[in-house]
């Protein structure tokens, strides 16, 4: 009797989406959009929409040049972490975001 020494992974293929690239960026069960790129002041941020199985999410990658001093670089790291937390808070799925989009504070704000 032979013993099985390696686990087998099997994923069911899923259909392409209306927004995925339908090319090498898609896998058997993962579909990816074209990259959305924002460049500014020597840095770059890339956002990609991803569906893995029945879960969709966006993926953010950023390349931000760091200051040449340790103090400056640490400030940049801390600021990036703080702003990423704010970003997650702003775009997280919660009541009111998907249905009716009731939280739109900029609409009634008056210009100063
Ligand atoms: Zn696809």
Image (cartoon, rainbow, N blue to C red):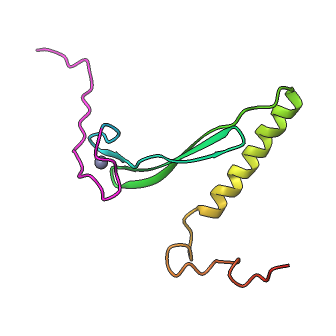
Residue at image coords 49%, 52%: 58
Residue 26 highlighted magenta (yes or no): no
Tell whether 58 sits left or right of 54.
Answer: right
- Which picture quadrant has residue 54? bottom left
Residue at image coords 70%, 77%: 106
Asked if 42 appears above or below 106 in the picture, the reply is: above
Q: Residue furthest top?
A: 2
Residue 15 highlighted magenta (yes or no): yes
Residue at image coords 79%, 83%: 110
* Quadrant of the snapshot with the N terminus: top left
Asked if 51 appears above or below 97 in the picture, the reply is: above
Asked if 98 appears above or below 17 in the picture, the reply is: below
* Quadrant of the snapshot with the C terminus: bottom right
Tell whether 91 sits left or right of 56.
Answer: right
Front in this rendered view, residue 71 or 98: 71
Considering the whole magenta stretch, tell me its main secondary structure.
loop
Q: Which residues are magenta?
A: 1-23
């Amino acid at each position: 009797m032979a013993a099985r020494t390696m686990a087998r992974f099997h994923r069911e293929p899923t259909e392409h989406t209306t927004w995925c690239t339908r090319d090498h960026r898609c896998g058997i069960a993962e579909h990816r959009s074209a990259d959305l790129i924002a460049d500014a002041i020597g840095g770059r941020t890339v956002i990609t929409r991803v569906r893995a199985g029945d879960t969709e999410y966006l993926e953010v990658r950023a390349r931000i040049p760091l200051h040449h001093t340790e103090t400056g670089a640490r400030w940049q790291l801390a600021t990036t972490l703080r702003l990423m937390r704010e970003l997650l808070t702003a775009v997280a799925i919660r009541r009111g975001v998907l249905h009716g989009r009731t939280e739109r504070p900029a609409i009634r704000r008056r210009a100063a």
